[in-house]
Amino acid sequence: MITTGLALPRRTFLRGLGATVALPFLDAMTPAFATAATPVTRVAFIYTANGVIMQDWTPTAEGTGFLFPKTLAPVEPFRDRLLVMSGLAHRNGEALGDGPGDHARAGASWLTGVHPKKTQGADIRNGRSVDQMLADEIGQTTPLPSLELGLEDVRMVGGCDSGYSCAYSNTISWASPTTPLPYENNPRRVFERLFGDGETTDPAARAVHARQNRSLLDFVVDDAHRLQVRLGAGDRRKLGDYLDSVREVERRIQNAERQERVDLPPVDRPEGVPPTFEEHVRLMSDLVTIAFQADLTRVVSVMYSREGGNRTYRSIGVPDAHHGLSHHQNDPVRMAQLQKIDQHHVAMLAYFLGKLQDAPDEDGSLLDNAIVLYGSSLSDSNAHTHDNLPALIAGGGSGMLRGGRHLRYPEGTPMTNLFLTLLDRMGVQRGHVGDSTGQITHLGTL
């Protein structure tokens, strides 16, 4: 890192006509002769629903040098930044006398480790999710303490699974045991949360703004030019690349909105916006990367799919519904179809990891300083099992994690032991998380 006599505040904004754009970390934000700052750790929790085909997920060998199974093949380029974890469980996702409803319990328990109350009414009760525990501590200095995202239209009231409220299936983030946090699935609204002026939420005012033909960056271009002439060559390149990324995301959102207005045959109309799953998840991944770069938030949760969701994946040759395929009854054909979905979701994760790896940070890349937990709260979807869950961690965690390994823990080790350990490594002290019984070992050098 080259430091200069110019010392910009860590959170610097370009401004113009009410629009603001937060900047990524630039060398000019480190004063000359200053000691290196402690890297900022960002955390993302990414959920894939309906279980996975575990035989194509789990490496056969432990430790280093393991072969990547078919489902995990898309993330092999990030081997040195990956921890594949086996043996973790969510016992509170099991029935425990409550009968059917494993999908609802899976979604509800993934980040809480708590057995949700079986109800379809307003008297829902779960636990506080680990992302919100982190937001309390590391999210209070950012404009958005946390960001909750998803890729499907959902509802939060009524019943969705065998007597369980839809709130349990359709979010993984809980501000309190009685307060689920609905996710945002519309990239336009996410973009506005990140870059809007924040002065009004009036729909009429937003409609006027949406009709304006000028890009957000057009409003701040003069401020950007004034800043660029004061920066070194490296910072000018970083700033140019970052602003190009913002403009490209904005352009893709506008294109998606134009496509959404086109009438499509109802049978082929995909769920969510933009019109394809792949475009949607990549756009959300780009928005998260920009939010991390500009330090607009440090905690994000993303649901690639929801429990019981029946999206189809025609782009990869899977016309059958996801949830229906998860009840495969050990039919090899149906299992092969489900495995394609599993692998496709991992490929979307690989796209996100690539964006983080390419984004420079204070020390290394965003991936070097990130913790990305990817997984599900169901393993064998056909049997609705909540043990030996699929889980992997990507990123260096600002030096807290040592990747390139498959770690196998004793069967039945609570997933919440992992959460408790991560919280502790990040300086967030909690006596327990859900049903945790202690911390786990071997995540890194600490």
Image (cartoon, rainbow, N blue to C red):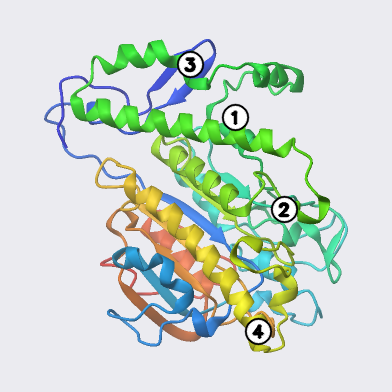
Give the residue at mark 3.
218
Distance from Cα at disc 2 to Cα at disc 1: 24 Å
Q: Secondary structure at mark 4?
A: helix
> Which structural element holds mark 3?
helix
Whole-number angstrom distance, CA of label 3 to CA of label 2? 33 Å
- Between residue 312 and residue 98, name the one nearer to us: 312
- Residue 200 image offset from top left, x and y in percent: 67, 19
Helix, strand or loop for disc 2 = loop
Q: How far from the left and from the top, in percent, is residue 192? A: 59, 29
Q: Residue at x 47, y 33 (%)?
A: 248
Task: State whether residue 208 appears in this view.
Answer: yes
Residue 30 visible in rendering: no
Examine the rendered structure and indicate whether residue 50 appears above or below residue 54.
above
Residue located beneath label 1 in the image:
192
If you read the primary sequence from the N terminus, does the residue marked by circle 3 or circle 4 appear first?
3
Q: Secondary structure at mark 1?
A: helix
Tag 4 residue: 333
Label 3 or label 2, whichever comes before in sequence order: 3
Q: Nearer the viewer, mark 2 or mark 1?
A: 2
The answer to which of marks 1 and 3 sits earlier in the sequence is: 1
Q: Which residue in the protein does label 2 denote?
A: 270
Q: How many numbered circles are shown?
A: 4
Residue 124 vs 342, above or below: the answer is above
Q: How far is disc 3 from disc 4 in space, using C-alphas?
A: 52 Å
